[in-house]
Amino acid sequence: MMHFCVIIIAVPVLIIMNFHLKDMIILFVLYLFIGMPISIIFSYLLTFLCLYLGVKLRRKKCLLQNDMS
C-alpha cells in the first residue's frame, strides 16, 4: 500500500520537474529493485523489534508483580 502512495506522489513531481519518460522508467525500476525490498525489510524489522520490546516489558511487569506479592 505504501508503495502505491510513493508512486502517486512521485509521478506528478517528476512530471513537474520535467523528467523524460525514459528517466522515470529507470527511476521506477531502481525503486522496485532497491527501494521496495529495503522498505519491506525495514518494516519487518520494526515489527519484530516492537514485538520483542513488548514481550520484554510484559515479562518485566510480570516479574515485578511476582516480587510484590
Image (cartoon, helix red, strand yellow):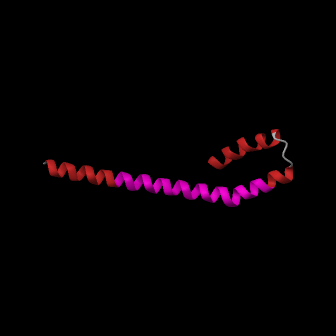
* Principal secondary structure, stretch drawn in magenta: helix
Which residue is painted at 85% across and 54% down in the image?
Answer: 22
Q: Where's residue 7, x and y in %?
A: 71, 46
Q: Indicate yes or no whether the magenta region holds residue 21.
A: no
Towards the viewer: 23 or 9: 23
Q: Position of residue 51 (x, y in %)?
A: 41, 54
Q: Residue at x 79, y 56 (%)?
A: 26
- Locate residue 50, reporting x and y percent: 43, 52
In this view, the residue farthest toward the front is: 17
Q: What's the residue at 58%, 56% (across, down)?
A: 40
Residue 24 as seen in the image, left or right of residue 44: right
Q: Is residue 58 visible?
A: yes
Residue at the (16%, 51%) spot, across then down: 67
Range of magenta residues: 26-55
The answer to whether 42 is drawn above or below residue 10 in the figure is below
From the viewer's perspective, tell me whether residue 48 is left or right of residue 40.
left
Q: Quick check: is 32 in the magenta stretch?
A: yes
